[in-house]
Image: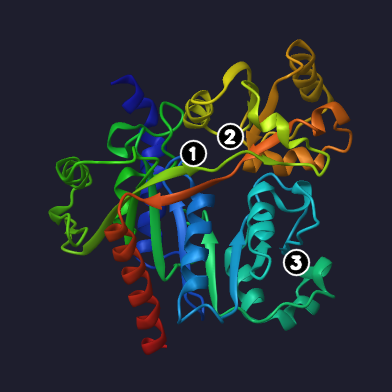
Amino acid sequence: MLDKVILAPYYLTLKLRHSLYDHGIFKVRTCEVPTICVGNITAGGTGKTPHTEMILRTLLKSDDWAYSNIAVLSRGHKRNSKGFQIVERDGSVKEYGDEPLQIKKKFPAVTVAVDRHRVKGCDILCHPEKLKTEKRARHCADAQIPPADLIVLDDAFQYRSLRAYFNIVLVDYNRPTYKDKLLPFGRLRDLPQRFHAADVIIVSKCPAYLEDEQKTQWAKAFGLKDYDVTTCRGTDRKGAEKTLLFTTIWYNSLQPIFEEADPRYAYSQKLVLFSGIAKDTPLRMYLSDEHKIVRHFRFADHHNYNKVDINKIMKAVREHPTAVVATTEKDSQRVLDYPRIPKDLKVRLFQVPIEVGFLSEHEKAVFEETLMTALNDFKKDY
């Protein structure tokens, strides 16, 4: 009860903010090309980046969008640079943030940019000639990018000044929004009812299999009526149709971070794990199947590694000289930013790539059909 009293001003502020946007008192803009927003209402840990990558794969293999100019726009969390920046594969986390850099390395043909001001960022992506005239893009004046035909917005669900054409909201299976509380008593950074603004709700980080009854229970908890596990759709309290889907994480085999890595370490029975993500429990459980984790270092989300951190890891290496050292794919981008990684660490340092996948081929097909139908409707309307 005390937490509700303390959180009341925060709750009312959020309520007022959304009301001002919903009633047109605060201006809301749209983009001239279709925009797909991947967001959440929780502070971190729902898997926005791997879902963004999944969407890019879906678009790049489709007949309608494979030959289009696709762009990704992110704010670039914890970057040191300012304004609008075009992400280069050989750039640094300090310039762009770890997640945009990771996406660019995986999808070199996709334009990846960072800008806190999403409206202006989208405008520049649609009109790259403005790179020469916009002050916020002055560091990109000589860059050459094609005009975007479609933009994927990473973590822009709370950015109400821009209305995305298609909204995907992620909810962590292990932390349901209807059981959570607003910060700082919980992990919610937005009102739990805000997911009704989404076109697709995805429950992420699920077990590999869920019974139909469990999916229906999730739909009821979200307030979706008449949820059909065949169509994966139900109706919300306003009568709008919503698609509810479920994804899980797939971990791939250990991959070296540095060229000097000795592949034989990947088969070591002992493992030193370190990570700077919101929650690494699933990763730890996965690695425990084939390795004995002898040391485990947890750092804050988006942590930038320094000499003290590397020394801690090297101490564990000296204590366990045959152990492999593993970290997340996102952390590997920040490790590469540190210029003095010892050779003894480079040879045994590996990352664990991840992907997300739907719990069934049927759900995957529903998602692709829903997304492509919405994008085709955009073409008809505009």
**Residue under label 1:** 45
Quadrant where the C terminus lies? bottom left
Q: Is residue 56 above or below residue 307?
A: below
**Residue under label 2:** 277
Disc 1 vs disc 2: Cβ atoms closer than 8 Å?
Answer: yes
What is the x, y in percent for residue 234? 17, 58
| Observer-nearest of 115 and 27 | 115
What is the x, y in percent for residue 86? 73, 65
What amino acid type should be assigned to the residue bearing mark 3? Arg
* Distance (Cα) linking label 2 and label 3: 30 Å
Q: Is residue 187 above or below residue 224?
A: above
Crowding at mark 3 (Cα within 10 Å: few <14, some 14-19, many 20+): some
What amino acid type should be assigned to the residue bearing mark 1? Gly
Pick out the residue farthest to the left: 226
Quarter-of-image position of residue 333: top right
Crowding at mark 1 (Cα within 10 Å: few <14, some 14-19, many 20+): many
Q: Closer to the N terminus: mark 2 or mark 3?
A: 3
The label number, if any, that marks residue 136 in the structure image: 3
